[in-house]
Amino acid sequence: MSTASIRCDRDNQLAQELLQHPDVQRVNRWIADNEDADKSSSLRRHLLTTSVRLSPQISPRLHAMAGHCGTALGLNLPLELYAYASPQYNAVCFKPEAGRLYIMFSSAILEAFTEKELLYVMGHEIGHHIYHHHDIPIGYILRGKAAPPADLALKLFAWSRYAEFSADRAGAFCANDLDAVARALFKLASGISHLSSSGQPGLIEFSLDEFLSQVNDMVEQDAAPGQGAPTQDWFSTHPFSPLRVKALTQFHESALMQPGGYSKDELEMRLHELMQLMEPGYLEAKTQATRIMRNLFIAAAMSLARLGGGVTKNEQGILQQFLGKSFDLDKLDISQLEALIPARITEALEHTTPSQRMQLVRDLALVARADEAGCRHKEQLLVRYARELGVPYNFVGQCMAHVPELD
């Protein structure tokens, strides 16, 4: 089986579109020019001075594991492994330099993860390299001095989630142990390292079925509006951990991992269905609840845009991306729409789910971020809307400030 066949179709499709985008190409040229202009500040020199290189003599087992992952995924570059002191579970794969690929691990992850769990982590990081995810400089673009065009920002956010799914599959392929992969994701999500195992009792006993039930609980909560609020992680740029385990369970059951498993096409269809849990799609559906959400989004988005002195070109791009090019923004009366917002919020509280309301707040944050004019006042207004919708106020800050990075 080729590594390319493991990759998520949607990741591949969005990546190809992004690599052709003029702004992505411009930032990549700027990065290349600056790297060429300053050869002295090499990544390897930085790693050697800020972390410890784990040579084959220091850690032969870790290098054997890295060799296994490299062979499984068709890696054609030598690997250098590094460790740095940190209580956080983390690992990162850097863009290759001078013909080497570098992976850095936190001390916590090396001490707390089993070999099978580390195989997943290594495979995940190498997967980012194999699938050329570093060719899309998402952090540079979203942190730039000027906000990126609306269509580009939305596409980057969507691509980053699917890129993580592709890397997850690469890691699961290396580990070939669904329970170990799930335990690794549980540790990453919870921060808990000491899980009970056979013959070793502990305070926390990990259960794959129980972890997956978190996804089912989210679905059930959405079916009963007002009965608790979903975790903010559902709306992060990285897929929520139980959702990742659910997707990897399906990957494990597919023909990519099991003879006689279901097809790649069906696997991608199931992933698409899972992603709908993170993207409720209230702007497209034609139910009473989604009509209410759409009407509230239009009114609140125009109100936010007004605080910046009117609907700018970039804000208009965001709104058109959500509402469709056929929607005529020029015909909207903002004052009239603002007067309707309290009644529409009341309707939303009565007829929509907590996750739909969080989705609405996140989408409004994209409108608020599209132009810097009046940004502080926009955030204050958005916090007010969130509070009235029963959404945690700190979720607004998370949406306004967060920039996705590949992990």
Image (cartoon, rainbow, N blue to C red):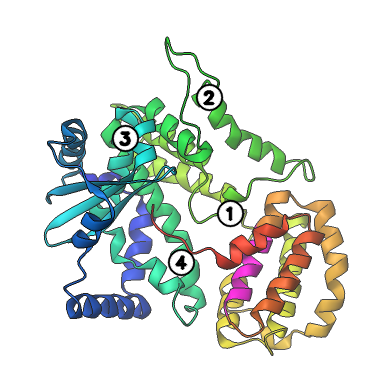
Q: Is residue 362 magenta?
A: yes
Callout 3 crowding tier (Cα within 10 Å): few <14, some 14–19, many ≥20: many
Disc 3 residue type (three-letter): Leu
Q: Which residue is mark 1?
A: 235
Say what secondary structure mark 3 lies in.
helix
Which dot marks residue 209?
2
The mark that comes first in sequence, 2 or 1, is 2
Q: Is residue 204 magenta?
A: no
Say what secondary structure mark 4 lies in.
helix
Q: Which residue is mark 4?
A: 155
Q: Which residue is mark 3?
A: 118
Cα–Cα gap, marks 3 and 4: 31 Å
Residue 300 quadrant: bottom right
Cα–Cα gap, marks 3 and 1: 27 Å
The mark that comes first in sequence, 2 or 3, is 3
Cα–Cα gap, marks 2 and 3: 22 Å
